[in-house]
Image (cartoon, rainbow, N blue to C red):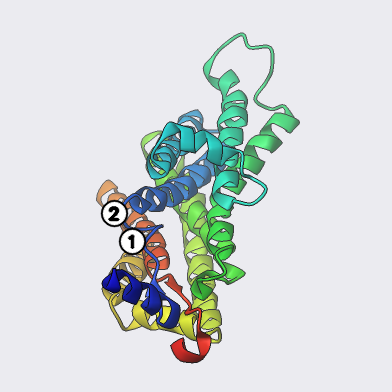
Amino acid sequence: MEIANQQSYYWMVRHTPQKEWIEGRGFWLWLAFVLGGMGGGLYLVSLYFDNTIGLVLGWLIVVALKGGAHLAYLGRPKRFWRAAFRWQTSWISRGILFVFGFGLFGAVQAAPAILNGLPWSEEIAIIKGLAVLFSFLVMIYPGFAMGYVKAIPFWNNAVLPLLFVSYGFLGGIGLFLPLAFAGGEGEGTVAALETGLRVMLAISALLLGLYLVGVNYSSGAARVSLRALLRGSLAAPFYLGVVISGVLLPLMVSWLSVVVGLTWPLLLVGLFGELGGSFALRYCLLKAGIYKPILLSVGQ
């Protein structure tokens, strides 16, 4: 009992790392955040290029894989259904509803391209618009869910939702490139995707820089998180995963593809680097979350 009371006291006066969203069942929430961004991004890119295979894969990643990860995080089916009806106060609940909406309208929009004889077309504007809306919401809501936790200043940054969206598009383009390359989409499409990838890499790097600069001017607890990210326990996954694997490696592959032409080895190296960066970014952001002390005069 004395040890438990001492730990509770430390939580009040010391910077305490959060564990609920990254350790134990939190692993599944991390996975859901990554898969939602990638699947939503792949669906939107595939919709733009009118690629049915990409639409189906993006839909499956969000509904089956992300939805399954959410269910695993909540633990019990009854908790899952109760959580879905707390949308007024919980961004996790809103995320579940966004997945439901995307599952419904994404399937309705893509169905005519798969099944003949349906009484509607995939070009109906309202259906396509709702599919786009819910896929975008699936990509962006993790940033709002994290920012809603006011006790963790590291996450209270307006750039965070935009960072999730940019990495979602980055993952979507990365996943779509092999489909375009294997499916004979044409040099123009592949070149456009490579250009889009370079642009999204630049935007993502810029947003990440703005996010970190903003954190540096935030509260003491946020700066503790930043030190862990840049010089502490999370420095290795951040620099190796986010910076080298997720930014520099895809940029190098993109440059080489311009010089020698895009090949399967180059494409796969770039893809695995980009996907590794996407997983590493979410991991670092979640792992670096630190609760600010309740007794600020002591903890700060």
9 lies above or below 53: below
Mark 1 secondary-structure assignment: helix
Mark 2 secondary-structure assignment: helix
Coordinates of residue 279 in the picture (x, y in percent)? 36, 57
Residue 190 can be seen, yes or no: no
Q: Nearer the viewer, residue 130 or 231?
A: 231
Left or right of 191: which side holds 85? Answer: right
* Picture residue at 69% right of the left edge, 17% below the top: 120
285 lies above or below 65: below
How many circles with numbers are drawn on the protein? 2
Res. 144 image quadrant: bottom right
Left or right of 124: which side holds 140? Answer: left
Q: Earlier in the sequence, mark 2 or mark 1?
A: 1
Left or right of 53: which side holds 137? Answer: right
Q: Which mark is on residue 253?
A: 1
Q: Which mark is on residue 266?
A: 2
Residue reaching furthest to the front = 1
Coordinates of residue 121 in the picture (x, y in percent)? 67, 20
Residue reaching furthest to the right = 126
Coordinates of residue 92 in the picture (x, y in percent)? 54, 49
Do residues under tags 2 and 1 come within 8 Å of each other at their CB atoms?
yes
Q: Residues within 10 Å of mark 1 (few under 14, many from 20)?
A: many
Q: Nearer the viewer, residue 82 or 211?
A: 82
